[in-house]
Amino acid sequence: MKNYLDDTKSIPERVEDALSRMTVEEKVGMIHAQSKFSSAGVPRLGIPEIWTSDGPHGVRPEVLWDEWSQAGWTNDSCFAFPALTCLAASWDKNLSLLYGISLGEEARYRNKNVLLGPGVNIYRTPLNGRNFEYMGEDPYLSSKMVVPYIKGVQSNGVAACVKHFALNNQEVDRDKVNVNVDDRTLYEIYLPAFKAAVMEGGTWAIMGSYNLYKNEQCCHNQYLLNDILRKEWGFEGVVISDWGGAHNTLQSITNGLDMEFGTWAPGMAWGKTNNYDNYYLAKPYLAMIKSGEAGTKELDEKVRRILRLEFLTAMAKNKPFGAMVSEDHIAAGHKIATDGIVLLQNKYNVLPIDLSKAKKIAVIGENAVKMMTVGGGSSSLKAKYEISPLDGLKKRAGTQTEIVYARGYVGDASSTADGYSTGQDLKETRSADELLTEAVNLAKGADYVIFVGGLNKSEHQDSEGADRLGLELPYNQDKLISELAKVNKNLVVVNISGNAVAMPWVNEVPAIIQGWFLGSEAGNAIAAVLAGDVNPSGKLPFTFPVKLNDNGAHALGEYPGSNGQVTYNEGIFVGYRWTDKQKIKPLFSFGHGLSYTTFEYGKVTADKKEMNDADKITFTVTIKNTGTREGSEIVQLYISDLKSSLPRPVKELKGFEKVNLKAGEEKVVSITVDKAALSFFDADKHNWVAEAGDFEALIGASSADVRSKVGFKLK
Ligand code: BGC
């Protein structure tokens, strides 16, 4: 009779059983990578390897065992979901669950055990090259949106790995910058989404970030990992280093890291292959154990957590089988994309376009054709298909409307990432003037001009490893847009980006759409909104400032820092908290987004005038669709503390509800909050405090469009 692992017991018992059979070498073998994306199991005991994969928006194609370049598999094309900024812009928790379930199914089908996402680093500056992978500037919105995503992914027996913990808010010097932030700001702004991921989402894994905090690398950081994550939040899952984020054996042993990936340790010549035995948590750890410099207590703790992960994922019984690029995934991706698109401006109702009347539409701009699922760093995908905006529009227009195209400018003609090519040839030999003239001439004779531009996934755009160089649109697009506006009054600008951009032409252009990186269904989703098949309902998850200095981090000069230090001088005043405080009018404010219909808000009421410590309070408002077509509105609740012993933001988002209304329909929306919504983090007490006194609840269609308010007291 063979002595197999007993799989009839509870997970804690199975963990102890497996642990008791393992040698020290086998244990150390499990806590570091064996290839770019996997770690070893224990073959002798039937414990499988753990396979991780990027990323937040789709399952990354296979790379070679020990290289970043493509393995060349032909069965690893995925469905590309919209970027997380788009998901956040839907403000729809059910869609976040759908996103997680669908993406988890793809990961499951591909036999991945850990999905390296979602990312919830707060949008501190519009220059951060990775903002497109995150969920915006507000800790409440990102907390609410991250939880269902995690639950959805993990319902497939695939772990979510929430990243990057913590304070990874810029790409410049990301692996060596030390972030100085006060405790209050840390707890109020930068930690809540991670805390929600752990305590409400129950994430099975979390990824440390590249940067430092309190001059200690975040991947082995006493304060973040031991004190906060494990002691304060009770995290039972696995801490995985970001790829190359571990830098020290002793700290990796003691400061909360469980699994080390992607390291180029000292003494390992750059490019030397299969150096995994020399990782900090490999031979050097073993040597310390052998010499008595280190014990095995921490090792056992790490392995316990990894074994638990095994039993929840690779060794989970009765897990589903998953699916790739299924009809359901396509429908989910399409829905998330259309619901995340934000109608920023729509003067004299240029949109939606009535395709039964428009004879000719000129589509201008590189982003109308450039594939966006490839590039951007680790989130780069090999999508089974990607519908470009131009193709989406052509398909939607059919034969009744002529669609003509001009590129207008050349942005980035490259088309490969990690050796994977989109197959597009974007080489261009004509001069910038020639391209501009062609576009303007085309625009002259069209009923509508749709300019599709913005950023892309190339370096210094929306891409990992570097930040943007400015808030402006690159490649001289501003000039082109202004020229187009001069010759055609029906100009629609579709901005494809994961970041705010400056729009000096905002008053010259009637309609503007924020298009995000929308994945496989991009073109179909954009066409559906432009043609009015879908009534847009997305709202911005971050502020669009007019200029860079309208953002706190830039106004106070602490970006990207110097001498390896960056100090968040703006403190808690991030995003709209800053523009509110400074009374700055943003280009487009947090929470802003229009619809093809109109909504009338009634007056907000509260179910009580005074609340006690343990009470809840409910705010109620009626919303009426006063237009002629069905639409959804995202009703936002902000709380304002009228008098406080510490400076507080003018208001903070503490609730939201998305409500769908037929033309003429009216619904009552109720949002309930408790004391937590009134609290701030008192650094001296190291606790959340709600001070007795007067508060206001503000109901708004955006952070800058408050429709009514009601006062109440905390006793
Ligand atoms: C990124 C992570 C990613 C990892 C693996 C790192 O460079 O920061 O987000 O999951 O690579 O590709």
Image (cartoon, grey):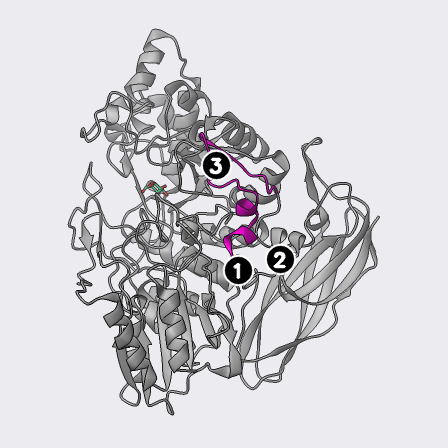
Q: Position of residue 437 (x, y in %)?
A: 27, 75
Q: CA distance from mark 1 to mark 3?
A: 23 Å
* Disc 2, SS: loop
Q: CA distance from mark 2 to mark 3?
A: 24 Å
Image quadrant of ligand 1? top left
The image shows residue 640, relative to residue 246, as above or below, that is: below
- The amino acid at mark 1 is Val
Q: Which mark is residue 561?
A: 3
The image shows residue 702, relative to residue 446, as above or below, that is: above
Contact (CB < 8 A) between labels 2 and 3?
no
- Label 2 or label 1, whichever comes before in sequence order: 1
Horizontal side of 106 relative to 647 (left or right) equals left
Give the farthest residue toward the bottom: 357
Residue at which label 1 appears: 546
The residue that appears at 55% across and 41% down in the rendered structure is 191
* Disc 1, SS: loop
Tell me which segment is drawn in magenta.
547-571
Q: Is mark 1 within 8 Å of ligand 1?
A: no
Residue 49 visible in image: no
Residue 205 visible in image: yes
Contact (CB < 8 A) between labels 2 and 1?
yes
Residue at which label 2 appears: 584
Residues packed near mark 3 inside 10 Å, few (<14), some (14 to 19) or many (20 plus): some
* Disc 3, SS: loop
Residues packed near mark 1 inside 10 Å, few (<14), some (14 to 19) or many (20 plus): many
Toward the viewer: 291 or 712?
Answer: 712
Q: Main secondary structure of the magenta part?
A: loop
Q: CA distance from mark 2 to mark 1?
A: 9 Å
- Label 1 or label 3, whichever comes before in sequence order: 1
Q: Quadrant of residue 269?
A: top left
- The amino acid at mark 2 is Ile
- The amino acid at mark 3 is Gly
